[in-house]
Amino acid sequence: AAARAGDPIALASFERAAQALAAGIAATATLVEIDIAVIGGGVAGAGDILFDPLRRSLRQYATLSFVRQLTVAPAVMGTDAGLVGAAAAAVRAGADGAADPRG
């Protein structure tokens, strides 16, 4: 709320967080050659307050040609993204028999 109201300290905090996140995303994208990085949970709810500086910072960190095309987007499910992903993994593990300790 403070950042949306223009508080300079709050905005600087988002800028710094965006730089750190961009560095991590760029490094990961370089190693595993992903095309999209999806940000979920409560962080995604920050909207443009986070995503604008994140995308700017990513342009600085993404120096290799295949990383420069990386898309960063908020998760469609917002704060439920992690929960839905965990449930999907549990269902998949059960279907594969991985949830059964007897194999």
Image (cartoon, rainbow, N blue to C red):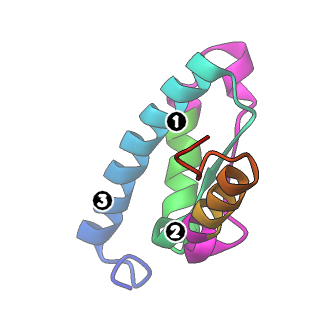
Residue 28: x and y in percent read 53, 27
Q: Which of the pair 12/79 is nearer the observer?
A: 79
Q: What residue type is labelled 3?
A: Ala
In the rendered image, the residue lying farthest to the top is 64
Q: Which of the pair 70/2 is nearer the observer?
A: 70
Q: Which amino acid does label 1 sit on?
A: Ile
Q: What residue type is labelled 2?
A: Gly
Q: Residue at x 64, y 69 (%)?
A: 84
Residue 44 is labelled as: none
Q: Which dot, 2 or 1, sits closer to the camera?
A: 2
Residue 41 is labelled as: 2
Which residue is tagged 1? 25
Q: Are marks 2 and 1 in contact (CB under 8 Å)?
A: no
Q: What distance separates the C-alpha of mark 2 from that of mark 1?
A: 16 Å
Q: In this view, does 54 lie to the left or right of 75?
A: left
Q: What stretch is highlighted in magenta?
A: 59-83
Q: Which dot, 1 or 3, sits closer to the camera?
A: 1
Residue 57: x and y in percent read 49, 39
How busy is the neighbourhood of tag 1: few (under 14 within 10 Å), some, or many (20 plus)?
many
Q: Is 15 rendered above or below residue 10? A: above
Q: Residue at x 43, y 50 (%)?
A: 18
Quadrant hosting residue 44: bottom right
How busy is the neighbourhood of tag 3: few (under 14 within 10 Å), some, or many (20 plus)?
few
Q: Which of marks 3 and 2 is nearer the N terminus?
A: 3
Residue 61: x and y in percent read 50, 26
Residue 3: x and y in percent read 38, 76
Which residue is tagged 3? 12
Q: Residue at x 38, y 85 (%)?
A: 1
Q: Which of the pair 35/49 is nearer the observer?
A: 35
23 drawn magenta: no
